[in-house]
């Protein structure tokens, strides 16, 4: 019974001292038999045989007892996913494992699971040990509408702006997609705050079928009707009200208020009321179009509101699979590229594919349009027929083979040119035929540019017209210089001086003639006119 307990407990392996091993080997080397040595020292034959074999293979050092320790593990290549997880967690400490998984999958197209994220964070000591949760209470009854604009939820929220100014918010949230269709902000909580948010939402996204609110005085009244209810009746919208003292009915919009406070309001300092309103609008846009939502399987509210979640998920999953292959080949990952919208009443998705651009409209089969890249087409044609292309180029250049060594055998600079061409091909990582095609194209462009009346990248008619305009500009500049010379000469002639008579003598009162300009006298006498000056400012 005792022996069985020792076996169950796992007895430790017996180790022999180094002196005993040396004595046994010394007796064996002296000529004693293995049986006599084992009987004398009380050892098993297999143990002595192991010592002899270890001494023969490794010498004296092989007899030392082996110290137990962890097995050596080969260091693997660095995982880019681990670096992305740790960087995202350090930049956003409030992010959880599922949030990190959704963000990396959405914006980096990295294939990673929540379990892997949790393991990486534990290894980096960035994840706190979870607290023991109490026994959960019975879960609430959950509901969700099947289509957008079937039900909107609305509620009010208040906070202190700069710790002394009370501000109120009202929001309308789509029940199906969690999309914020409308919101308003004011320094009061009157009924106008709610109607302003409703009018904005209806103007942008249409009329919903139902609106769910609480029993606040902005929404309803115990006696009579409010203006909000009158507006709903006028628009043909059914008004649903939650049970008193039961905020779980409006759980979706209540959860939005918590997200708004945790991610934006509690960590932002605003300069003024207008600054708060402007930045709040930017946050709502980011919440609708950029923030992955856990209740929507990592999609954004806009993906579901505009009925594009399926197309976006397909585009993201395709890029995730492509990056999985790249990671296995230790290649850099690529971020997803896609455009989602509506073409009439049908959804449209444009996403990057391996061979071009993938376009899908509605439920039709996707179509792939190849990219019209000149280099890609040339490389594809060279892969199909590299030998033919090289032969044609070699024949056009007067060569005889792939490297055209025979055509330039007598040229003393052929060896240097061949070496330079080879270096250029290796640096550009292209084939020899592709290099000669590029060289021929460059020579044609140079010859075209050297022709008179033409310019590279511009039709001949445009170049001729530009030359004519340049000649016209030169003529106008010459006329301008000529007119400036005439103007300067006229200014010299019209320079102010003493008034002279038509005979050249200064006029005076003794002659009985008035101090009129000569031009006036001659106009009165013989009708002639010549440039002169006058000392009277009124006659100039």
Image: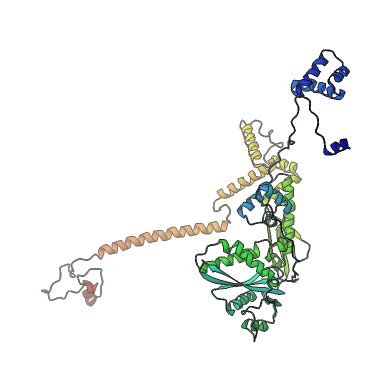
Q: Position of residue 50 (x, y in %)?
A: 83, 24
Q: Position of residue 400 (x, y in %)?
A: 71, 36
Give the residue at x 72% y 57%: 316
Q: Residue placed farthest to the front in the image?
A: 2
Q: Is residue 68 left or right of residue 92?
A: right
Q: Nearer the viewer, residue 508 or 369?
A: 369
> Which quadrant is home to the C terminus?
bottom left
Q: Quadrant of residue 409?
A: top right
Q: Position of residue 453 (x, y in %)?
A: 54, 53
Q: Nearer the viewer, residue 277 or 123?
A: 123
Q: Is residue 110 above or below residue 40?
A: below
Q: Quadrant of residue 99?
A: bottom right
Q: How was this image coloured?
A: rainbow
> Which quadrant is home to the N terminus?
top right
Q: Is residue 419 left or right of residue 276?
A: right
Q: Is residue 298 left or right of residue 8?
A: left
Q: Quadrant of residue 73?
A: top right
Q: Is residue 31 above or below residue 103?
A: above
């Amino acid at each position: 019974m005792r022996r069985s307990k020792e076996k169950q407990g796992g007895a430790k392996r017996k180790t022999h001292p180094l002196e005993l091993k040396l004595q046994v080997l010394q007796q064996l080397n002296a000529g004693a038999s293995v049986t006599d040595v084992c009987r004398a020292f009380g050892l098993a034959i297999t143990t002595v045989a192991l010592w002899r074999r270890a001494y023969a293979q490794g010498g004296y050092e092989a007899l030392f007892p082996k110290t137990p320790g962890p097995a050596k593990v080969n260091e693997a290549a660095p995982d880019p996913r681990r670096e992305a997880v740790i960087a995202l967690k350090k930049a956003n400490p409030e992010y959880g494992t599922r949030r990190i998984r959704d963000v990396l999958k959405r914006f980096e197209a990295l294939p990673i699971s929540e379990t892997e994220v949790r393991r990486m964070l534990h290894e980096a000591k960035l994840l706190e040990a979870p607290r023991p949760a109490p026994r959960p209470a019975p879960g609430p009854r959950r509901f969700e509408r099947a289509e957008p604009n079937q039900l909107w939820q609305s509620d009010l929220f208040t906070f202190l702006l700069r710790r002394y100014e009370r501000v109120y918010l009202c929001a309308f949230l789509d029940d199906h997609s969690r999309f914020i269709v409308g919101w308003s902000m004011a320094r009061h909580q009157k009924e106008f705050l709610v109607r302003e948010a409703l009018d904005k939402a209806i103007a942008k996204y249409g009329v919903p079928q139902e609106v769910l609110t609480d029993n606040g005085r902005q929404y309803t009244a115990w006696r009579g009707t409010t203006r909000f209810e009158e507006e709903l009746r006028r628009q043909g919208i059914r008004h649903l009200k939650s049970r008193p003292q039961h905020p779980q009915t409006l759980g979706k919009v209540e959860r939005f208020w918590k997200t708004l406070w945790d991610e934006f309001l509690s960590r932002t300092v605003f300069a003024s009321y207008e600054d708060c309103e402007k930045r709040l609008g930017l946050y709502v846009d980011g919440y609708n179009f950029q923030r992955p939502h856990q209740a929507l399987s990592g999609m954004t509210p806009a993906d579901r509101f505009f009925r594009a979640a399926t197309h976006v998920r397909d585009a993201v999953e395709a890029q995730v699979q492509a990056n999985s292959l790249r990671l296995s080949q230790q290649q850099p990952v690529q971020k997803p590229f896609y455009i989602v919208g509506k073409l009439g009443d049908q959804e449209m998705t444009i996403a990057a594919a391996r061979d071009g651009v993938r376009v899908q409209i509605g439920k039709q089969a996707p179509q792939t349009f190849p990219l019209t890249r000149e280099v890609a087409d040339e490389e594809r044609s060279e892969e199909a027929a590299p030998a033919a292309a090289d032969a044609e180029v070699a024949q056009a250049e007067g060569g005889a083979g792939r490297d055209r060594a025979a055509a330039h055998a007598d040229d003393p600079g052929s060896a240097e040119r061949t070496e330079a061409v080879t270096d250029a091909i290796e640096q550009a990582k292209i084939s020899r035929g592709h290099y000669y095609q590029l060289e021929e194209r460059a020579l044609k462009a140079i010859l075209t540019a050297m022709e008179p009346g033409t310019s590279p990248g511009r039709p001949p008619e445009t170049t001729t017209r530009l030359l004519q305009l340049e000649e016209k500009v030169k003529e106008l500049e010459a006329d301008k210089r000529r007119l400036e010379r005439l103007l300067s000469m006229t200014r010299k002639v019209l320079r102010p001086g003493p008034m002279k008579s038509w005979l050249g003598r200064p006029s005076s009162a003794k002659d009985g003639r008035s101090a009129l300009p000569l031009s006036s006298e001659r106009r009165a006498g013989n009708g002639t006119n010549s440039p002169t000056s006058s000392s009277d400012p009124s006659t100039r």
